Amino acid sequence: MGFLRCGLVAAVATLVASALASPTGELASRQEGTGVGFTYSFPEYREVFQVAPPVLGPEGPLDSWGRDRVKVQEPIQKRQETGACKMLLMEHTFASSYEKPFIGNYTPPDCEFNRVLLNFTATVQPGVQYDRLAIMYLGDTEIWRTSTAEPLRERGGAIWTYWKDVTPFMYFWKQPQKIIFDLGNIVDEQYTSPFNTTLTATFFVADEDSVGTTVAAGAEKWGPADRIIPVSARKSATDQVSAWRFPEDEAKDTLTAFPATRAAPCLAKVDSFDPGTVSGLDAWREVQVFIDDHLVGVSWPYPVLFTGAMSPMMHRPIVGLNTFDLKEQEIDITPWLPLLCDGEDHTVSLRVVCLDDTAAGGPAIVPTPSNWVLTGKVFVWLDEDEAKVQFDPSGGDIQSNPFVSETSMIYSLLAHRGFVVEGKIVTQAGEKEVSWAQSLNFTTNLEFSTSLNPRGGQLEQTTVMAIEGAESASGMAEYRSEYSYPFKGMAALRTWQGRDAERPWQGVYVVLPNYLFVQVVDQKIEGSPVFPSGVEAYNGTYGASHLFTTRESFHNEMLTERGSISHILYGSNVGLLWGKFRAGRAFVQ
Protein backbone atom coordinates (compact mmCIF):
# COMPACT_ATOMS: atom_id res chain seq x y z
CA MET A 1 0.00 0.00 0.00
CA GLY A 2 1.87 2.96 0.85
CA PHE A 3 4.97 3.82 2.64
CA LEU A 4 6.11 7.18 3.56
CA ARG A 5 8.38 7.78 6.37
CA CYS A 6 11.75 9.25 6.95
CA GLY A 7 14.13 7.30 9.05
CA LEU A 8 17.82 7.67 9.62
CA VAL A 9 20.41 5.14 10.46
CA ALA A 10 23.88 6.09 11.48
CA ALA A 11 27.24 4.53 11.40
CA VAL A 12 29.06 7.85 11.44
CA ALA A 13 29.15 11.10 9.78
CA THR A 14 30.02 14.44 11.20
CA LEU A 15 29.22 17.68 9.45
CA VAL A 16 30.17 21.00 10.94
CA ALA A 17 29.24 24.04 8.90
CA SER A 18 29.55 27.64 9.96
CA ALA A 19 29.17 30.90 8.11
CA LEU A 20 29.83 34.46 9.16
CA ALA A 21 29.85 36.21 5.78
CA SER A 22 28.58 35.90 2.25
CA PRO A 23 30.35 33.08 0.35
CA THR A 24 31.20 35.26 -2.60
CA GLY A 25 30.79 38.78 -1.27
CA GLU A 26 30.15 41.47 -3.85
CA LEU A 27 28.76 40.23 -7.14
CA ALA A 28 28.10 43.44 -9.06
CA SER A 29 28.64 47.18 -9.13
CA ARG A 30 28.06 49.16 -5.97
CA GLN A 31 25.42 51.76 -5.26
CA GLU A 32 25.65 54.60 -2.79
CA GLY A 33 23.43 55.90 -0.03
CA THR A 34 23.71 58.49 2.73
CA GLY A 35 23.65 58.21 6.49
CA VAL A 36 24.08 60.67 9.33
CA GLY A 37 27.25 62.52 8.42
CA PHE A 38 28.71 60.00 5.98
CA THR A 39 28.25 58.21 2.67
CA TYR A 40 28.10 54.43 2.37
CA SER A 41 27.91 52.01 -0.56
CA PHE A 42 26.54 48.50 -1.08
CA PRO A 43 26.88 45.92 -3.88
CA GLU A 44 23.99 45.87 -6.32
CA TYR A 45 23.48 42.17 -5.61
CA ARG A 46 24.50 40.32 -2.49
CA GLU A 47 24.59 36.55 -2.21
CA VAL A 48 22.52 35.00 0.55
CA PHE A 49 22.41 31.36 1.52
CA GLN A 50 21.03 28.78 3.92
CA VAL A 51 23.26 26.47 5.93
CA ALA A 52 22.01 22.91 5.51
CA PRO A 53 23.34 19.33 5.36
CA PRO A 54 25.33 18.46 2.22
CA VAL A 55 23.80 16.72 -0.77
CA LEU A 56 25.31 14.02 -2.96
CA GLY A 57 26.45 15.35 -6.32
CA PRO A 58 28.07 13.53 -9.24
CA GLU A 59 31.54 14.28 -7.85
CA GLY A 60 30.75 13.90 -4.16
CA PRO A 61 29.39 16.11 -1.37
CA LEU A 62 28.09 19.59 -2.16
CA ASP A 63 27.09 22.15 0.42
CA SER A 64 23.61 23.64 0.38
CA TRP A 65 24.55 26.36 -2.09
CA GLY A 66 26.25 23.91 -4.46
CA ARG A 67 29.95 24.41 -3.86
CA ASP A 68 32.38 21.59 -3.16
CA ARG A 69 33.49 23.21 0.08
CA VAL A 70 33.14 20.16 2.31
CA LYS A 71 36.51 18.97 3.58
CA VAL A 72 36.80 15.21 3.81
CA GLN A 73 39.56 13.50 5.76
CA GLU A 74 39.10 10.19 4.01
CA PRO A 75 38.20 9.34 0.37
CA ILE A 76 34.54 8.73 0.99
CA GLN A 77 33.02 10.64 -1.91
CA LYS A 78 30.89 8.67 -4.32
CA ARG A 79 31.97 8.34 -7.92
CA GLN A 80 29.41 7.89 -10.62
CA GLU A 81 29.63 4.92 -12.95
CA THR A 82 28.35 6.86 -15.97
CA GLY A 83 28.53 10.51 -16.93
CA ALA A 84 26.03 12.93 -15.46
CA CYS A 85 23.59 14.71 -17.73
CA LYS A 86 21.91 18.05 -17.08
CA MET A 87 18.59 19.45 -18.21
CA LEU A 88 17.17 22.96 -18.08
CA LEU A 89 13.71 22.69 -16.55
CA MET A 90 12.84 26.38 -16.21
CA GLU A 91 14.16 29.82 -17.05
CA HIS A 92 11.51 32.33 -16.09
CA THR A 93 10.88 35.77 -14.62
CA PHE A 94 8.12 35.99 -12.01
CA ALA A 95 6.74 39.53 -12.07
CA SER A 96 2.95 39.89 -11.79
CA SER A 97 2.58 36.16 -11.39
CA TYR A 98 -0.21 35.44 -8.92
CA GLU A 99 -2.28 32.58 -10.34
CA LYS A 100 0.16 32.51 -13.28
CA PRO A 101 2.58 29.66 -12.56
CA PHE A 102 5.32 28.56 -14.92
CA ILE A 103 4.21 25.56 -16.99
CA GLY A 104 6.73 23.25 -18.64
CA ASN A 105 7.06 19.71 -19.92
CA TYR A 106 9.59 17.15 -18.78
CA THR A 107 10.83 14.15 -20.74
CA PRO A 108 13.29 11.72 -19.08
CA PRO A 109 16.86 12.27 -20.32
CA ASP A 110 18.58 9.82 -22.62
CA CYS A 111 21.06 8.71 -19.97
CA GLU A 112 21.16 6.24 -17.14
CA PHE A 113 20.44 7.62 -13.68
CA ASN A 114 19.38 6.62 -10.19
CA ARG A 115 19.73 10.02 -8.51
CA VAL A 116 18.31 13.46 -9.36
CA LEU A 117 19.55 16.79 -8.04
CA LEU A 118 17.84 20.16 -8.59
CA ASN A 119 19.67 23.48 -8.80
CA PHE A 120 17.51 26.55 -8.22
CA THR A 121 19.18 29.93 -8.76
CA ALA A 122 17.36 33.25 -8.43
CA THR A 123 18.07 36.96 -8.42
CA VAL A 124 15.95 39.88 -7.30
CA GLN A 125 17.01 43.42 -8.17
CA PRO A 126 17.30 46.26 -5.62
CA GLY A 127 13.92 47.69 -4.79
CA VAL A 128 10.84 46.95 -2.74
CA GLN A 129 9.49 43.42 -2.65
CA TYR A 130 8.15 40.94 -0.11
CA ASP A 131 9.51 37.49 0.46
CA ARG A 132 7.38 35.03 -1.53
CA LEU A 133 6.43 31.37 -1.23
CA ALA A 134 7.28 29.06 -4.14
CA ILE A 135 6.12 25.48 -4.78
CA MET A 136 7.25 23.03 -7.45
CA TYR A 137 4.90 20.31 -8.70
CA LEU A 138 5.29 17.32 -10.95
CA GLY A 139 1.73 16.99 -12.17
CA ASP A 140 -0.56 17.10 -9.14
CA THR A 141 2.19 16.28 -6.63
CA GLU A 142 4.21 18.85 -4.74
CA ILE A 143 7.89 17.89 -4.62
CA TRP A 144 9.53 21.00 -3.16
CA ARG A 145 8.52 24.10 -1.23
CA THR A 146 10.84 27.08 -0.87
CA SER A 147 10.73 30.84 -0.32
CA THR A 148 12.60 33.84 -1.66
CA ALA A 149 15.08 36.39 -0.38
CA GLU A 150 13.87 39.94 0.11
CA PRO A 151 15.70 42.83 -1.61
CA LEU A 152 16.49 46.22 -0.16
CA ARG A 153 16.04 49.46 -2.04
CA GLU A 154 19.32 51.11 -1.02
CA ARG A 155 21.30 48.12 0.24
CA GLY A 156 21.17 45.94 -2.82
CA GLY A 157 19.27 43.07 -4.34
CA ALA A 158 19.92 39.40 -3.67
CA ILE A 159 21.14 36.30 -5.49
CA TRP A 160 20.97 32.77 -4.14
CA THR A 161 21.34 29.14 -5.15
CA TYR A 162 19.94 26.06 -3.47
CA TRP A 163 20.51 22.39 -4.32
CA LYS A 164 17.69 19.97 -3.60
CA ASP A 165 17.96 16.16 -3.68
CA VAL A 166 14.72 14.91 -5.26
CA THR A 167 15.75 11.27 -5.68
CA PRO A 168 12.81 10.07 -3.51
CA PHE A 169 10.51 11.10 -6.40
CA MET A 170 12.18 8.72 -8.87
CA TYR A 171 8.72 7.33 -9.71
CA PHE A 172 7.99 10.63 -11.48
CA TRP A 173 11.42 11.27 -13.01
CA LYS A 174 11.28 8.00 -14.96
CA GLN A 175 8.26 9.13 -17.00
CA PRO A 176 7.11 12.33 -18.77
CA GLN A 177 5.67 14.97 -16.46
CA LYS A 178 4.10 18.41 -16.47
CA ILE A 179 6.22 20.82 -14.42
CA ILE A 180 4.34 23.52 -12.54
CA PHE A 181 6.38 26.07 -10.60
CA ASP A 182 4.30 28.55 -8.65
CA LEU A 183 5.88 31.77 -7.34
CA GLY A 184 3.18 34.35 -6.83
CA ASN A 185 4.58 37.87 -7.06
CA ILE A 186 3.41 41.45 -7.56
CA VAL A 187 5.25 44.11 -9.56
CA ASP A 188 3.71 47.58 -9.67
CA GLU A 189 4.55 51.12 -8.59
CA GLN A 190 4.90 50.04 -4.96
CA TYR A 191 6.48 46.58 -5.30
CA THR A 192 9.18 46.97 -7.91
CA SER A 193 11.32 43.83 -8.07
CA PRO A 194 10.66 40.68 -10.15
CA PHE A 195 12.37 37.35 -9.48
CA ASN A 196 14.58 35.98 -12.26
CA THR A 197 14.91 32.22 -11.85
CA THR A 198 16.66 29.23 -13.38
CA LEU A 199 15.94 25.61 -12.49
CA THR A 200 18.13 22.76 -13.73
CA ALA A 201 18.22 19.04 -12.96
CA THR A 202 21.32 16.84 -12.82
CA PHE A 203 20.83 13.13 -13.45
CA PHE A 204 23.59 10.70 -12.50
CA VAL A 205 24.35 7.19 -11.30
CA ALA A 206 25.73 6.52 -7.82
CA ASP A 207 26.68 3.16 -6.38
CA GLU A 208 23.75 2.55 -4.04
CA ASP A 209 25.87 0.21 -1.92
CA SER A 210 28.19 3.08 -1.08
CA VAL A 211 25.68 5.91 -0.74
CA GLY A 212 25.38 6.80 2.91
CA THR A 213 22.24 5.27 4.44
CA THR A 214 20.67 4.89 7.85
CA VAL A 215 19.32 1.38 8.18
CA ALA A 216 18.87 -0.46 11.46
CA ALA A 217 20.87 -3.64 11.92
CA GLY A 218 19.17 -6.53 10.11
CA ALA A 219 16.51 -4.28 8.57
CA GLU A 220 15.70 -4.13 4.89
CA LYS A 221 16.89 -1.15 2.87
CA TRP A 222 13.97 0.47 1.10
CA GLY A 223 14.44 1.84 -2.39
CA PRO A 224 12.37 4.52 -4.12
CA ALA A 225 8.62 4.10 -3.84
CA ASP A 226 6.81 1.96 -6.42
CA ARG A 227 4.07 4.54 -6.59
CA ILE A 228 3.40 8.06 -5.29
CA ILE A 229 -0.22 9.14 -4.95
CA PRO A 230 -0.96 12.87 -4.63
CA VAL A 231 -3.21 14.16 -1.88
CA SER A 232 -4.08 17.50 -3.42
CA ALA A 233 -6.64 19.52 -5.35
CA ARG A 234 -5.45 17.82 -8.60
CA LYS A 235 -5.66 20.81 -10.95
CA SER A 236 -2.60 20.26 -13.14
CA ALA A 237 -4.76 19.27 -16.12
CA THR A 238 -5.92 22.90 -16.30
CA ASP A 239 -2.41 24.31 -15.67
CA GLN A 240 -3.28 25.33 -12.14
CA VAL A 241 -1.55 24.63 -8.84
CA SER A 242 -2.88 21.73 -6.78
CA ALA A 243 -2.46 23.13 -3.26
CA TRP A 244 -5.41 23.84 -1.01
CA ARG A 245 -5.74 27.10 0.90
CA PHE A 246 -7.20 26.23 4.28
CA PRO A 247 -9.73 27.11 5.63
CA GLU A 248 -11.07 28.67 2.41
CA ASP A 249 -10.75 25.32 0.64
CA GLU A 250 -11.86 21.96 1.94
CA ALA A 251 -8.58 20.03 1.96
CA LYS A 252 -9.97 16.64 0.97
CA ASP A 253 -8.98 14.10 -1.68
CA THR A 254 -10.17 10.63 -2.64
CA LEU A 255 -7.94 7.57 -2.96
CA THR A 256 -9.50 5.10 -5.36
CA ALA A 257 -8.83 1.38 -5.64
CA PHE A 258 -5.79 1.45 -3.39
CA PRO A 259 -3.38 -1.33 -4.46
CA ALA A 260 -2.16 -4.17 -2.28
CA THR A 261 1.33 -3.36 -1.08
CA ARG A 262 4.42 -4.51 0.62
CA ALA A 263 2.98 -3.07 3.80
CA ALA A 264 5.60 -0.52 4.24
CA PRO A 265 4.53 2.75 5.75
CA CYS A 266 1.84 4.62 3.90
CA LEU A 267 2.34 8.23 4.52
CA ALA A 268 0.07 11.12 4.10
CA LYS A 269 2.99 13.47 4.02
CA VAL A 270 1.97 16.91 5.10
CA ASP A 271 3.32 20.05 3.51
CA SER A 272 2.02 23.11 5.29
CA PHE A 273 2.68 26.83 5.39
CA ASP A 274 0.92 29.83 6.84
CA PRO A 275 1.49 33.03 4.86
CA GLY A 276 -1.26 34.90 6.66
CA THR A 277 -0.97 37.71 9.19
CA VAL A 278 -1.33 37.42 12.94
CA SER A 279 -4.66 35.76 13.61
CA GLY A 280 -5.26 37.00 17.13
CA LEU A 281 -5.31 33.45 18.48
CA ASP A 282 -2.50 31.49 20.11
CA ALA A 283 0.86 30.48 18.63
CA TRP A 284 0.18 26.72 18.60
CA ARG A 285 -0.88 25.12 15.31
CA GLU A 286 -1.61 21.49 14.50
CA VAL A 287 -2.07 20.02 11.03
CA GLN A 288 -4.25 16.92 11.28
CA VAL A 289 -4.41 14.06 8.78
CA PHE A 290 -7.56 11.95 8.49
CA ILE A 291 -8.43 8.84 6.52
CA ASP A 292 -12.20 8.91 6.29
CA ASP A 293 -13.08 9.99 9.84
CA HIS A 294 -10.02 8.43 11.49
CA LEU A 295 -7.22 10.66 12.78
CA VAL A 296 -4.02 8.96 11.58
CA GLY A 297 -1.37 11.50 12.59
CA VAL A 298 -0.53 15.14 13.19
CA SER A 299 2.15 17.68 12.34
CA TRP A 300 3.34 20.60 14.46
CA PRO A 301 5.16 22.62 11.78
CA TYR A 302 8.60 24.08 12.29
CA PRO A 303 8.37 27.88 12.88
CA VAL A 304 10.14 29.15 9.76
CA LEU A 305 11.40 32.73 9.76
CA PHE A 306 11.13 34.15 6.26
CA THR A 307 13.46 36.83 4.98
CA GLY A 308 11.12 39.71 5.73
CA ALA A 309 10.71 38.73 9.39
CA MET A 310 11.54 41.44 11.93
CA SER A 311 14.13 43.19 9.75
CA PRO A 312 15.38 42.12 6.29
CA MET A 313 18.93 43.04 7.37
CA MET A 314 18.87 40.12 9.81
CA HIS A 315 18.67 37.67 6.91
CA ARG A 316 21.83 38.76 5.09
CA PRO A 317 23.92 36.90 4.21
CA ILE A 318 22.46 33.95 6.15
CA VAL A 319 18.74 33.24 5.87
CA GLY A 320 16.74 31.42 8.53
CA LEU A 321 16.75 27.70 9.13
CA ASN A 322 14.68 25.84 6.49
CA THR A 323 13.84 29.12 4.71
CA PHE A 324 14.94 27.83 1.30
CA ASP A 325 13.78 24.25 1.94
CA LEU A 326 10.59 23.96 3.97
CA LYS A 327 10.55 20.52 5.54
CA GLU A 328 7.71 18.04 5.36
CA GLN A 329 6.15 15.88 8.05
CA GLU A 330 5.96 12.13 7.49
CA ILE A 331 3.22 9.99 9.02
CA ASP A 332 3.35 6.21 8.82
CA ILE A 333 -0.06 4.82 7.92
CA THR A 334 0.98 1.18 7.55
CA PRO A 335 -1.47 0.12 10.30
CA TRP A 336 -4.29 1.39 8.08
CA LEU A 337 -3.41 -0.79 5.09
CA PRO A 338 -6.32 -3.21 5.61
CA LEU A 339 -8.77 -0.32 5.48
CA LEU A 340 -7.12 1.17 2.40
CA CYS A 341 -6.97 -2.18 0.61
CA ASP A 342 -10.63 -3.12 1.05
CA GLY A 343 -11.43 -2.20 -2.56
CA GLU A 344 -13.45 0.88 -1.60
CA ASP A 345 -12.73 4.56 -2.13
CA HIS A 346 -11.34 6.40 0.87
CA THR A 347 -11.01 10.08 1.68
CA VAL A 348 -7.81 11.71 2.93
CA SER A 349 -8.32 15.14 4.45
CA LEU A 350 -6.08 17.75 6.07
CA ARG A 351 -7.14 20.22 8.73
CA VAL A 352 -5.36 22.97 10.67
CA VAL A 353 -6.45 23.80 14.20
CA CYS A 354 -5.42 26.21 16.94
CA LEU A 355 -6.49 27.14 20.46
CA ASP A 356 -9.17 29.76 21.10
CA ASP A 357 -8.87 30.69 24.78
CA THR A 358 -11.73 33.19 24.52
CA ALA A 359 -14.34 30.59 23.62
CA ALA A 360 -17.43 30.33 25.78
CA GLY A 361 -16.97 27.60 28.35
CA GLY A 362 -13.17 27.75 28.29
CA PRO A 363 -10.35 27.18 25.79
CA ALA A 364 -11.35 25.19 22.72
CA ILE A 365 -9.55 23.73 19.72
CA VAL A 366 -10.96 25.39 16.60
CA PRO A 367 -10.09 25.57 12.87
CA THR A 368 -7.46 28.24 12.28
CA PRO A 369 -8.75 31.38 10.56
CA SER A 370 -5.37 31.95 8.90
CA ASN A 371 -4.39 31.10 5.37
CA TRP A 372 -2.54 27.75 5.16
CA VAL A 373 -1.25 26.16 1.96
CA LEU A 374 -1.60 22.37 2.20
CA THR A 375 -0.81 19.31 0.12
CA GLY A 376 0.08 15.70 0.85
CA LYS A 377 1.23 12.53 -0.83
CA VAL A 378 1.32 8.81 -0.18
CA PHE A 379 4.45 6.77 -0.94
CA VAL A 380 3.61 3.17 -1.85
CA TRP A 381 5.70 -0.01 -1.87
CA LEU A 382 3.78 -2.83 -3.56
CA ASP A 383 2.98 -6.31 -2.27
CA GLU A 384 0.42 -8.93 -3.21
CA ASP A 385 -0.95 -9.81 0.21
CA GLU A 386 -3.93 -8.44 2.08
CA ALA A 387 -3.76 -7.20 5.66
CA LYS A 388 -5.77 -7.03 8.86
CA VAL A 389 -5.51 -4.42 11.55
CA GLN A 390 -6.66 -3.35 15.00
CA PHE A 391 -5.90 0.05 16.45
CA ASP A 392 -6.26 2.19 19.56
CA PRO A 393 -5.44 5.90 19.07
CA SER A 394 -5.27 8.33 21.98
CA GLY A 395 -5.31 12.12 22.22
CA GLY A 396 -3.68 14.91 24.22
CA ASP A 397 -4.25 18.09 26.20
CA ILE A 398 -3.66 21.82 25.85
CA GLN A 399 -3.53 24.51 28.55
CA SER A 400 -3.16 28.30 28.42
CA ASN A 401 -2.13 30.53 31.33
CA PRO A 402 -2.38 34.30 30.75
CA PHE A 403 -1.16 36.82 33.36
CA VAL A 404 -1.68 40.58 33.12
CA SER A 405 -0.25 43.43 35.22
CA GLU A 406 -0.36 47.21 34.78
CA THR A 407 2.93 47.41 32.83
CA SER A 408 3.26 43.96 31.32
CA MET A 409 1.34 41.02 30.01
CA ILE A 410 2.62 37.45 30.12
CA TYR A 411 0.90 34.72 28.15
CA SER A 412 1.98 31.09 28.36
CA LEU A 413 0.69 28.06 26.52
CA LEU A 414 1.38 24.38 27.10
CA ALA A 415 0.28 21.71 24.65
CA HIS A 416 0.77 17.96 24.58
CA ARG A 417 -0.31 15.36 22.07
CA GLY A 418 0.07 11.62 22.50
CA PHE A 419 -1.01 9.38 19.65
CA VAL A 420 -0.60 5.62 19.13
CA VAL A 421 -2.09 3.25 16.58
CA GLU A 422 -1.25 -0.46 16.61
CA GLY A 423 -2.29 -3.37 14.48
CA LYS A 424 -1.38 -6.58 12.69
CA ILE A 425 -0.85 -7.00 8.99
CA VAL A 426 -0.13 -9.98 6.75
CA THR A 427 2.41 -9.72 3.95
CA GLN A 428 4.50 -12.14 1.93
CA ALA A 429 6.88 -12.20 4.89
CA GLY A 430 4.08 -13.33 7.21
CA GLU A 431 2.13 -11.68 10.00
CA LYS A 432 3.66 -8.65 11.66
CA GLU A 433 2.64 -6.26 14.39
CA VAL A 434 2.91 -2.67 13.21
CA SER A 435 2.53 0.63 15.01
CA TRP A 436 2.82 4.38 14.63
CA ALA A 437 3.30 6.59 17.68
CA GLN A 438 3.73 10.31 18.24
CA SER A 439 4.45 12.28 21.40
CA LEU A 440 4.56 16.07 21.00
CA ASN A 441 5.05 18.96 23.41
CA PHE A 442 4.68 22.67 22.78
CA THR A 443 5.48 25.55 25.13
CA THR A 444 5.45 29.27 24.54
CA ASN A 445 5.81 32.32 26.75
CA LEU A 446 4.91 35.70 25.31
CA GLU A 447 5.63 38.82 27.34
CA PHE A 448 4.79 42.45 26.56
CA SER A 449 6.31 45.10 28.81
CA THR A 450 6.44 48.90 28.87
CA SER A 451 8.45 51.45 30.80
CA LEU A 452 8.28 55.25 30.78
CA ASN A 453 10.52 58.06 31.98
CA PRO A 454 10.48 61.86 31.51
CA ARG A 455 12.65 61.64 28.39
CA GLY A 456 11.30 58.55 26.68
CA GLY A 457 10.16 54.99 27.07
CA GLN A 458 10.38 51.43 25.89
CA LEU A 459 7.96 48.84 24.55
CA GLU A 460 9.33 45.30 24.44
CA GLN A 461 7.98 41.96 23.25
CA THR A 462 9.76 38.71 24.05
CA THR A 463 8.73 35.30 22.73
CA VAL A 464 10.24 32.02 23.92
CA MET A 465 8.88 28.93 22.22
CA ALA A 466 9.82 25.27 21.91
CA ILE A 467 8.43 22.32 19.99
CA GLU A 468 9.60 18.85 20.99
CA GLY A 469 8.54 15.59 19.43
CA ALA A 470 9.25 11.88 19.23
CA GLU A 471 7.83 9.66 16.49
CA SER A 472 8.33 6.00 15.81
CA ALA A 473 7.15 3.28 13.46
CA SER A 474 7.76 -0.41 13.89
CA GLY A 475 6.88 -3.68 12.24
CA MET A 476 8.06 -3.07 8.68
CA ALA A 477 10.69 -0.39 8.09
CA GLU A 478 11.88 0.57 11.57
CA TYR A 479 11.97 4.31 12.14
CA ARG A 480 12.36 6.73 15.02
CA SER A 481 12.71 10.49 15.06
CA GLU A 482 13.34 12.85 17.96
CA TYR A 483 13.41 16.59 17.42
CA SER A 484 13.51 19.85 19.30
CA TYR A 485 12.88 23.32 17.84
CA PRO A 486 13.65 26.01 20.45
CA PHE A 487 13.11 29.61 19.41
CA LYS A 488 13.57 32.98 21.08
CA GLY A 489 12.64 36.33 19.60
CA MET A 490 12.81 39.82 21.05
CA ALA A 491 11.65 43.12 19.61
CA ALA A 492 12.15 46.35 21.52
CA LEU A 493 11.15 49.87 20.51
CA ARG A 494 12.89 52.58 22.51
CA THR A 495 12.15 56.32 22.22
CA TRP A 496 14.24 59.17 23.57
CA GLN A 497 13.81 62.94 23.36
CA GLY A 498 17.10 64.80 23.01
CA ARG A 499 17.54 67.90 25.21
CA ASP A 500 21.32 68.12 25.39
CA ALA A 501 22.82 70.90 23.25
CA GLU A 502 25.79 68.64 22.55
CA ARG A 503 23.52 66.14 20.86
CA PRO A 504 23.13 66.67 17.07
CA TRP A 505 19.55 65.50 17.26
CA GLN A 506 18.55 67.94 20.02
CA GLY A 507 14.84 68.47 20.33
CA VAL A 508 13.80 65.49 18.20
CA TYR A 509 12.70 62.02 19.12
CA VAL A 510 15.11 59.18 18.50
CA VAL A 511 13.53 55.79 17.85
CA LEU A 512 15.72 52.74 18.47
CA PRO A 513 14.31 49.45 17.18
CA ASN A 514 16.25 46.41 18.41
CA TYR A 515 15.67 42.83 17.29
CA LEU A 516 17.09 39.51 18.41
CA PHE A 517 16.25 35.96 17.50
CA VAL A 518 17.72 32.52 18.12
CA GLN A 519 16.68 29.49 16.07
CA VAL A 520 17.62 25.86 16.71
CA VAL A 521 17.01 22.58 14.88
CA ASP A 522 18.04 19.51 16.87
CA GLN A 523 16.97 16.25 15.21
CA LYS A 524 17.96 12.62 15.68
CA ILE A 525 16.74 9.93 13.29
CA GLU A 526 17.16 6.18 13.38
CA GLY A 527 15.92 3.61 10.89
CA SER A 528 14.84 3.75 7.25
CA PRO A 529 14.19 7.24 5.86
CA VAL A 530 12.29 8.21 2.75
CA PHE A 531 13.91 11.62 2.39
CA PRO A 532 17.62 12.50 2.42
CA SER A 533 19.20 12.73 5.85
CA GLY A 534 22.50 14.40 4.98
CA VAL A 535 24.60 11.24 5.20
CA GLU A 536 23.93 10.24 1.57
CA ALA A 537 27.00 12.17 0.48
CA TYR A 538 29.30 9.83 2.40
CA ASN A 539 30.11 6.14 2.22
CA GLY A 540 28.77 3.86 4.91
CA THR A 541 25.74 2.46 6.65
CA TYR A 542 24.75 4.33 9.76
CA GLY A 543 22.57 3.39 12.69
CA ALA A 544 21.45 6.96 13.43
CA SER A 545 22.10 10.57 12.52
CA HIS A 546 22.04 13.73 14.59
CA LEU A 547 21.57 17.13 12.97
CA PHE A 548 22.09 20.19 15.15
CA THR A 549 21.89 23.70 13.68
CA THR A 550 21.64 27.06 15.42
CA ARG A 551 21.22 30.58 14.13
CA GLU A 552 21.51 33.80 16.08
CA SER A 553 21.11 37.35 14.84
CA PHE A 554 20.93 40.75 16.49
CA HIS A 555 19.93 43.95 14.72
CA ASN A 556 20.07 47.48 16.05
CA GLU A 557 18.69 50.47 14.17
CA MET A 558 18.53 54.19 14.97
CA LEU A 559 15.92 56.43 13.33
CA THR A 560 15.94 60.23 13.64
CA GLU A 561 14.72 63.16 11.59
CA ARG A 562 18.14 63.24 9.93
CA GLY A 563 18.22 59.68 8.65
CA SER A 564 18.85 56.17 9.86
CA ILE A 565 21.77 53.91 10.64
CA SER A 566 21.41 50.13 10.66
CA HIS A 567 23.87 47.74 12.21
CA ILE A 568 23.97 43.97 12.30
CA LEU A 569 25.96 43.56 15.47
CA TYR A 570 26.09 39.79 15.49
CA GLY A 571 25.10 36.94 13.22
CA SER A 572 26.12 33.32 13.08
CA ASN A 573 24.93 29.97 11.82
CA VAL A 574 26.41 26.69 12.98
CA GLY A 575 25.39 23.18 11.97
CA LEU A 576 26.46 19.77 13.21
CA LEU A 577 25.59 16.37 11.75
CA TRP A 578 27.00 13.34 13.48
CA GLY A 579 26.39 9.69 14.28
CA LYS A 580 27.96 6.53 15.58
CA PHE A 581 30.19 4.44 13.36
CA ARG A 582 29.23 0.98 12.38
CA ALA A 583 32.12 0.68 9.94
CA GLY A 584 34.64 3.08 8.51
CA ARG A 585 35.26 6.61 9.60
CA ALA A 586 34.52 10.03 8.19
CA PHE A 587 34.70 13.55 9.51
CA VAL A 588 33.57 16.63 7.67
CA GLN A 589 34.34 20.17 8.70
Image (cartoon, grey):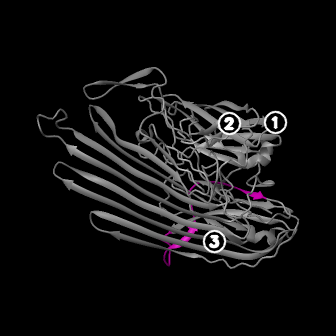
Q: Nearer the viewer, residue 198 or 520?
A: 520
Q: Residue 203, can we see it?
A: yes
Q: Residue 372, can we see it?
A: no
Residue drawn at (33%, 64%) of the image: 409
> In this rendering, which labeled residue sits more in front, label 3 or label 2?
2
Q: Is residue 371 magenta?
A: yes
> Magenta segment range?
356-380
Q: Identify residue for label 1.
A: 107
Q: Earlier in the sequence, mark 3 or mark 2?
A: 2
Residue drawn at (76%, 70%) of the image: 336
- Where residue 568 appears, as percent x and y from the top left, is 35, 39
**Gap between marks 1 and 2, in whole Å?**
21 Å
Left or right of residue 491: residue 137? right
Question: Is residue 311 shown above or below 397?
Answer: above
The amino acid type found where label 2 is placed reads Pro
The amino acid type found where label 3 is placed reads Ala
- Where residue 49 appears, as percent x and y from the top left, is 51, 38
Residue drawn at (81%, 72%) of the image: 338
Q: Identify residue for label 2.
A: 58
